[in-house]
Amino acid sequence: MEHFPRQAERNRMVDAQIVARGVCHPGVLAALRKVPRHLFIPCDCQAQAYEDHPVRIACGQTVSQPYMVAIMTELLELAPTDRVLEIGTGSGYQTAILAQLAAEVVSIERHAPLADIARQRLMELEYSNVTILCGDGSLGYYERAPYNAILVTAGSPAIPAPLKEQLGENGRLLCPAGGRDFQRLIKVIRKANTYIESESISCIFVPLIGEEGWPAQ
Ligand code: SAH
């Protein structure tokens, strides 16, 4: 990938917001320094691209705060051979970070305009290991299962059962679960038919809307 403008801002973002808060996975930090976050953000908000908060995108959604992207990616413990499923493509920024670290990423978005914009952006940036689909990701995507890692980037009332079932052996699933406006990040590791759950940080994500998530309002 070529070098993109605003490198100094990306480096500052990584040093001040990510390393300073304890994320230290070298691959995650390298991906965050490299991927041009501003290109995933609508023109009128691009000035905020490297700031320490979520940023508004189309369809009333947001791209997560850089720190949240970093910690979730670190917790997924990705290997270069991994196949990853992401639920909630949004801007496609998190998808690009995952694509830097894994062999293949399938990402599902329920809003067609967001899926289209993200697909176009990732194509322009020459990510050939990414597939963007439009649909209800709370059901996962059985056609390409099992996955080594599944990342849900929207808040769910509980961990969707179909996603657990689509994890491979030693697969890791991360999902914000809890209330509609406040969740805890839950990590699930699959060992045969046992699922080991642990709780990580608290967080605030837009709701996961779908059959295994919240009803649309
Ligand atoms: N990972 C994104 C974060 C986007 S916010 C990024 O880096 O920009 C979460 C996204 O999840 C929103 O775009 C929302 O539309 C989407 N979403 C909510 N429920 C969904 C569902 N059931 N299936 C797929 N996408 C969903």
Image: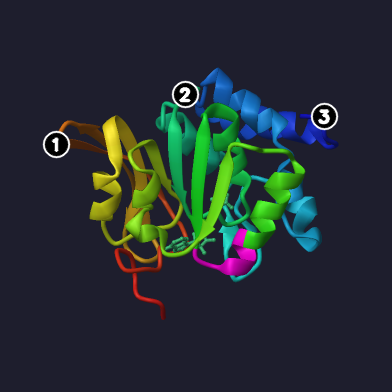
In the figure, 41 relative to 80: above or below?
Answer: below
| Amino acid at the residue labelled 2 | Thr
Label 3 residue SS: loop
Q: Residue furthest left?
A: 193
Residue indicated by mark 3:
3
Colouring used for the render: rainbow
The answer to whether the beta carbon of the residue marked 1 is less than 8 Å from any atom of ligand 1 is no
Q: In the displayed structure, does residue 44 sit left or right of residue 177?
A: right
Of labels 2 and 1, earlier in sequence is 2
| Residue mark closest to the camera, 3 vs 1 | 1
Please report the residue visible at 61 percent of the width from the left and 35 percent of the height from the top. Answer: 17
* Disc 1 residue crowd, few under 14, some 14–19, many 20+, Cα 10 Å: few
Which image quarter: residue 3? top right
Mark-to-mark CA distance, 2 and 1: 23 Å
Q: Upstream in the sequence, badge 3 or badge 1?
A: 3
Residue under numbered circle 2: 81
Residue 209 visible in the current orientation: yes
Q: Is residue 112 left or right of residue 139?
A: right
Label 1 belongs to which residue?
Answer: 193
Which range is magenta?
A: 110-115
User: Which residue is painted at 47% across and 24% down in the image?
Assistant: 81
